[in-house]
Image (tube, rainbow, N blue to C red):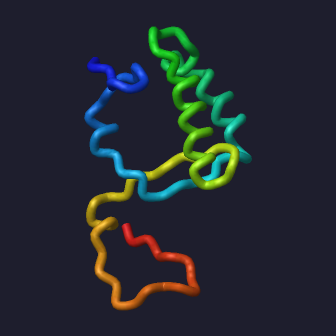
Amino acid sequence: MEESRSWGVPATRDSEDYHLDLWVDVSDVYDRWVDACREHQLLRGEISFDYLHYYGGLAAKRGAEIGVKRAVTVSLPPISRQRKVDFFPVDSEPVLIF
């Protein structure tokens, strides 16, 4: 697997096509997620890359981007990113169309 130049993280086709479209605060459930991850060989540290450490750092980075302790991001389907709206919703939450 090819490594990215900046962090030594395995580069994947997914990471190249991934767009940061939506941030979700997961601070309250992060510890439960870590406990669940430790049940899986991939994230227990039994392979050469420490995925749990990587994803923990990424959750902290994403959290810092929106001012919370931990967050994850979602990449919306391309059709949801390319929308025409007839108004600019100033006083309401944006509506996501999947």
- Is residue 73 placed above or below 81 in the rendered structure? above
**Residue reaching furthest front?**
6
Q: Disc count in the image?
A: 0
In this rendered view, identify the residue nearer to me: 76 or 32.
76
Q: Dividing the image into 4 quarters, which one contains the N terminus? A: top left
Find residue 30 and report its horizontal and vertical position in percent: 67, 39
Q: Is residue 11 left or right of residue 46?
A: left
Residue 4: give x, y in percent of width and height: 33, 25
In front of the other: 35 or 75:
75
Q: Quadrant of residue 15?
A: top left
The quadrant of the picture occupied by the C terminus is bottom left
Who's the residue at 53% across and 55% down the image?
23
Name the residue at 30% across, 75% down. 83
Q: Nearer the viewer, residue 68 or 30?
A: 68
Point out the residue furthest to the bottom here: 86
Q: Position of residue 33 (x, y in %)?
A: 64, 35
Q: Please tell me which residue is depicted at 42% across the width and 58% down the height of the picture.
A: 21
Q: Is residue 2 above or below residue 33?
A: above
Residue 91 is situated, as x and y percent measured from the top left of the image, at 58, 86
| Residue depicted at 34% across the width and 84% down the height | 85
**Above or below for 45 versus 37:** above
